[in-house]
Image (cartoon, helix red, strand yellow):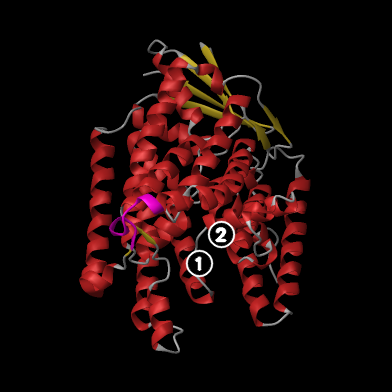
Amino acid sequence: MQVDQSLNCIGLSCPMPIIKLNKAIKSMESGEVLEMIGSDPGSKSDVPAWCNKTGNIFLEQTEDNGAFKFYIKKQ
Amino acid sequence: MFKKGEMRELFDSLFAKSWPMWVGGILLAVLNILLFVVKYPWGSSSGYTNIGQNLFQFLDINSLGTTVPIKLHTVALLNIFIVVGAFIASLFSKEFGIRVAPIGELIKGFIGGALMGIGATVGAGCTIGGFFTGVAALSCGALALAVGFAIGTFVALRYLLWEMEALPKISSGKSFTFLAGTGKKTGWQRWLGWVLIAAVLYLVSTYTSKGNAMKVMGWHVLFGLLFGMILQRSRYCIVRAFREPFMTGEATAPVAVIISILVALVGFTVFKYFGVGNSSELAFRAIEMKAVYANFWLRALIGGFIFGLGMTMAGGCAVGTLWRAGEGHVKLWMSAFGFVVMAPVSRLFIVPFVKGILPESMQKMLFLPDILGYTGAVVLVLLILLLWYWFVKWNERTGKFSAL
């Protein structure tokens, strides 16, 4: 997968990851892919829900040693 | 006895996936109803104040007065064992990890906690004892607190959005995660969880073997443990209930909180109406007035506003701070610390000042059924909850009030 931008949210807790995600997506072009790395377990449900609400496409989620990676395509 | 894998299935159904928040809401309300009869319905901020007073006493700062030791304070015990319960649940679900946020976030956590310490003492209640319990207990002040929370949350959310644009460095910088529990190598986390469960149960038994007063303490340890586990599994969050309509517009959290208030409302109303546990006229009134405080309306509004600012900055209310602290978020450790330090100071220096300048008519102890009767009071609370539900669903659909 081609990642156009990466966003580090390690250590941050709710609501900062979603506020940062919102800002990052705004600066991107339609069709580009954002990789967001976070460590808050709440993000596992918050990020897909935010994508659902805003119409951006939730592509994939991986988990490795307490770090979650989310891939989101801007609508 | 069991087929291979059946116990595992049970364990996984509890700990493999998060529970819907409304499921947690119902369970918390049921425990809250039980607490009502054990001693007093659920609250949290007086526990923070007690822990803070003990801390100052330990440091030989005695100007804040002497106090009940933590081990004999039911609310302080609830608070501590909510942290322990959430810690155990996050170990079981492999969601524990020490998450160190950037320094700017840690400072925001401390300031948020300190503001909650001021708000909860000034307003005579936090999101749990003042609002969740308070509304279900038909307290008039609880409604004023809710308005304060909403205004405070709205203002602080505006600040967070502004900060993200103007001062992005606050939430960036060095951050770490330690001891995280995902992956296969973290079997130790589950074992530690079981060891802690055994240790807490042993502690409960040491309390319950010491006579009636201590039995109540022991049960509060157990209640704290259960509250903590339910809170972590369902990620129950009252900040979200107030913030989400103004942020993403999602209605999941407010709906979960509305459901939990509804369930508690049924239980509390029965107990108050029939005076369950009363032995005299005096006791009957004391039961009716449980979770009703002298804060209607301006006192609750001011306190609620300050508390709303704090909980939104910290990212967790009194109880949201506790369960997230148990899950390993260092920002919420700072928030708990700020709350603990500031609550006793505010109680001694800020609260008397506020009480002094506000007229009596703005800090009344008002029980809704005294004005409207039980039927009127319950109908009013139901209408307010219905209105809240309508607002969050309408806003979810239209996004009129959502910033993101």
Q: CA distance from mark 1 to mark 2?
A: 8 Å
Residue B397 percent location from the top left of the image: 25, 37
Q: In the rendered structure, the residue with mark 2 lies on which chain? A: B
Q: Nearer the viewer, residue B126 or B98?
A: B126
Disc 1 + disc 2, Cβ < 8 Å: yes
Query: Which quadrant of the structure image shows residue B218?
Result: bottom right
Q: Looking at the rendering, which quadrant does residue B216 occupy?
A: bottom right
- Dot 1 crowding, Cα within 10 Å, few <14, some 14–19, many 20+: some
Q: Is residue B402 left or right of residue B264?
A: left
Residue nearer the viewer, A75 or B322: B322
Tell me which numbered mark, 1 or 2, is placed earlier along the sequence: 1
Amino acid type, callout 2 = Phe
Residue drawn where x is 37% and y is 28% of the image: B158
Chain identity of mark 1: B
Disc 1, SS: helix
Find residue B313 and name its label: none
Q: Mark on residue B227?
A: 2
Q: Is residue A23 magenta?
A: no
Q: Are marks 1 and 2 on the same chain?
A: yes
Q: Is residue B105 left or right of residue B264?
A: right
Left or right of B259 on screen, residue B32: right
Label 1, on which residue? B31
Q: Which residues are magenta?
A: B356-364
Image height check: is B132 above or below B286?
Answer: above
Q: Is residue B293 left or right of residue B334?
A: left
Image quadrant in which you'd find residue B101 = top right
Residue drawn where x is 35% and y is 32% of the image? A53
Q: Position of residue B321 (x, y in %)?
A: 56, 45
| Quadrant of the image containing the C terminus of chain B | top left
Q: Is residue A9 above or below residue B352?
A: above
Q: Amino acid at mark 1?
A: Leu
